[in-house]
Image (cartoon, grey):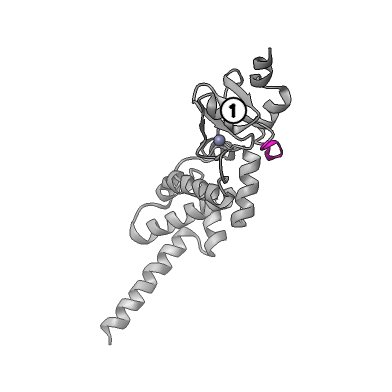
């Protein structure tokens, strides 16, 4: 009976795990049978299946039961700092800006809850994840406007913005010019520079 009491997850513990509740850190550790890994309650990794969860009150108990400490929440040492987690998130966005990235998809990919991700991201970078996604998309579009002759609609789609009018509005909001104006201005400036060199 004692053994069951130690290992079965209570509703309170389960909620703490689901909500990555740091208030329960050091109160208990949870191990996941299928992965062989144990975590702090606050761990941002994906929530396990409840039936695979085992609870231990100390990390030593989890270790002696054969579980390894999680690399992410580092139950034996320091925790992953917020800034490191945010670089995981920005890296994901940098690699996936061409696809739709709703907050829940981002949170799932980066092992956290949408709420927690949103809050931590803003705390570290001062902007919301969606604003960062927009910045990356506008920057990538700018590169294409400068270096290619692709149509505006194609560029919009290639940076993950299938709504072309919205892309144009956002581009103007962020750079003060529409994509076409920007491209014309850029080419014009190049010509002026070129002429200036030739006439020297
Ligand atoms: Zn963990």
Question: Is 11 or 173 nearer to us in this picture?
Answer: 11
Relative placement, left or right, of 141 versus 43 is left
Say which quadrant the N terminus sits in.
Answer: top right
Residue under the point 45% across and 49% down: 94
At which x and y percent is residue 171? 52, 57
Question: What residue is shown with label 1?
Answer: 61
Q: Quadrant of residue 3?
A: top right
At which x and y percent is residue 47? 59, 29
Q: Magenta segment: does it hold 24?
A: yes
On screen, residue 1 above or below 108: above
At which x and y percent is residue 48? 57, 25
Indicate the quadrant of ligand 1 in the picture. top right
Residue under the point 54% across and 26% down: 64
> Does any portion of residue 47 appear in the rendered image?
no
Residue sitting farthest toward the right: 12
Relative placement, left or right, of 13 versus 92 is right
Question: Is 124 or 64 nearer to us in this picture?
Answer: 64
> Does any portion of residue 3 appear in the rendered image?
yes
Give the SS element for disc 1: helix
Q: Magenta segment: does it hold 180?
A: no
Establish whether ligand 1 lies closer than 8 Å to the Cβ of label 1.
no
Question: Is 14 or 127 nearer to us in this picture?
Answer: 14
Residue under the point 54% across and 52% down: 132
On screen, residue 90 above or below 67: below
At which x and y percent is residue 97? 46, 46
Magenta region, residue range = 21-26
User: Label 1 crowding class (10 Å Cα cut-off): few <14, some 14-19, many 20+?
Assistant: few
């Amino acid at each position: 009976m004692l053994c069951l009491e130690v290992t079965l997850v209570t509703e309170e513990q389960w909620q703490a795990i689901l909500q990555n509740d740091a208030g329960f850190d050091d109160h208990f550790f949870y191990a996941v049978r299928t992965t062989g890994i144990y975590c702090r309650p606050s761990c941002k990794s994906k929530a396990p299946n409840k039936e695979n969860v085992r609870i231990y009150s100390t990390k030593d108990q989890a270790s002696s039961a054969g579980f390894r400490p999680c690399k992410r929440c580092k139950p034996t040492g320091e925790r992953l700092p917020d800034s490191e987690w945010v670089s995981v998130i920005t890296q994901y966005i940098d690699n996936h800006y061409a696809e739709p990235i709703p907050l829940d998809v981002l949170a799932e990919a980066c092992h956290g809850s949408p709420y927690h991700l949103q809050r931590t991201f803003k705390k570290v970078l001062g902007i919301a994840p969606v604003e960062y996604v927009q910045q990356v998309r506008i920057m990538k579009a700018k590169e294409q406007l400068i270096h290619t002759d692709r149509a505006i609609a194609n560029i919009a789609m290639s940076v993950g913005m299938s709504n072309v009018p919205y892309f144009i509005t956002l581009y103007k909001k962020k750079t003060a010019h529409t994509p076409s104006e920007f491209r014309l201005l850029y080419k014009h400036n190049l010509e002026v520079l070129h002429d200036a060199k030739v006439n020297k």
